[in-house]
Amino acid sequence: MNDSHSSSSDSTSKAAIDQNVGRSRRNGNGDQILATDIPRHWHDIFWLGVFLFHLMGLALALAVLGLNRFKKSDRFNFDRYTNNITGTVGNSHGLTEDYWPMYGLGGGVGTVLGWAWLLLLGFQANHMMKISVHILTTYLAVVSVLCFWSEHFFWGVTFAIGAALQFLYVISVIDRLPFTMLVLQKAVKMVWSLPEVMRVSYAFMLVMLLWMGLWSFGAAGVVASNINLNGRWWLLVVLSLSLFWTGAVLCNTVHVIVSGMVFLVLIHGGREAGSMPPNSLMKSLRYSVTKSFGSICYGSLFTAAIRTLRWEIRGLRSKIGKNECLLCCVDFLFHLVETLVRFFNKYAYVQIAVYGKSFNRSARDAWELFQSTGVEAIIAYDCSGAVLLMVTLLGGLITGTCSAVWTHIKWDDDRVTMVGSTAMLMGMVLVGLAMVVVESAVTSIYICYAEDSLLIHRWDAEFFNQLSEALHQRLQHRSSRAREVLTQNRLNVGIQENAPL
């Protein structure tokens, strides 16, 4: 009986793969499937307006905050307001130019790390990714020890918890890392065959660096102000949230540009193919910063947070065991997050790049495509997004440490954590802009595999076979898990029916 169920499951899995492999393109040729000939429309204009309004308002606020203590203490006489609110007098922490160089160091280190990672990935992608995964736990633990040593107990505990969570997560997904590294290697291979997308990433890093010059000017003014400790922290939190959104928008703009190029290359069989439309990169760039920019701004608000929450819940869910009460609570959160993923996922940016849809429609279409083809099974198994996030976190930690050490040499007080934590965010944004080109290639590969897996076969036949084998194994695994749950439920029902009254 079990053998018949097993063979039935295997045939079902193979049929799903064969159906996926046999899917034809939506149109007869590569030119028609792409959005290069489809008229584009403006989408999510409200969020475009919100982002631009926020950017202009923040630029003004940053300039005022920085100038207030630049070369002259309390240039705009803000102290009379802060003194009335906080009751502090003569609590000035210096001038803007005292802290601006520390942020300049952070921006420089973050940029160098981002460029260096992209270059090193081209030569030793597998080794660099493995180093990032394993060294992050150690680095978090070392930073925790340094925080305790310098009597910053809150941050010491925070980094210690981060090191423990990172270690537990790596242990929970250790069996997935070989497949993840394979996917990342192929994504790096694709990216390095398109040097123009590498230049796009470098250019956007420079744009982000220019914005960070103004942002850090205002942040330095906040650190130097005479506002009490809580007030300065709240201001820095608001500025950090703004920087996070701005960085996410630039990262996802690069995501859309790179995704469009990778999809074109896979559809047409290579960047040198005669069917490749002219000026593809410039068209993708123009669409991403005009008609698709509102969708990018909208998606950037929620996607990263939901993705991170999903990874953590998946890791926790796999390690709970038989604690039914806890499992019930985690399952509720899991299904809630899975519902949100349908409306906010990184694969939406590929649909935006290719078809010019709105963000929510792109997210739903991408998720339905994966569900209908079974490709979602290997996407859930793949940890490439988490690995790239580890690289980003490591870059941010190194950047924050450099700025914090310099600040600690000059001042040994609360200013160290202020400058260090905000410089860490700057480093994460800059390194993330470098890593997003690899993530874009990964998402485009999965979308192409779901749309028409023969595109992957034409690009790399060996990789196609490995993906198909992985999909077959994951579908088998899901079928066996479903049978186990069904059998256990039947046993529970039988026990309840036979129980004495």
Image: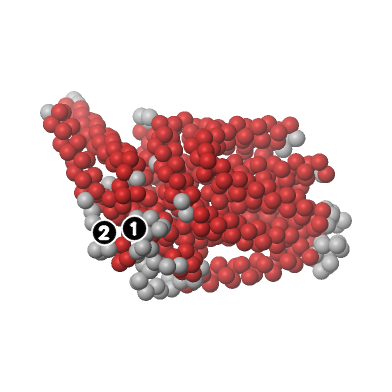
Mark 2, other Cα within 10 Å: few <14 / some 14–19 / many ≥20: some
User: Which residue bears the numbered disc 1?
Assistant: 267
- Residue located 60% across and 49% down the image: 115
In-image side of 152 versus 279 (left or right): right
* Discs 2, 1 touching: Cβ within 8 Å: yes
- Residue located 70% across and 36% down the image: 147
Quarter-wise, where is residue 465 in the image? top left
What x and y, as percent, mark residue 117? 57, 44
Q: Disc 2 or disc 1, which is closer to the eye?
A: 1
In-image side of 293 versus 458 (left or right): right
Q: Secondary structure at mark 1?
A: helix
In-image side of 233 versus 171 (left or right): right
Mark 1, other Cα within 10 Å: few <14 / some 14–19 / many ≥20: many
Upstream in the sequence, badge 2 or badge 1? Answer: 2
User: Which residue bears the numbered disc 2?
Assistant: 25
What x and y, as percent, mark residue 386? 48, 43
Q: CA distance from mark 2 to mark 1?
A: 9 Å
- Give the amino acid at mark 1: Ile
| Residue 457 seen | yes
Work out which quarter of the rendered image holds the C terminus and state it: top left
182 to 264, vertically: above or below: above
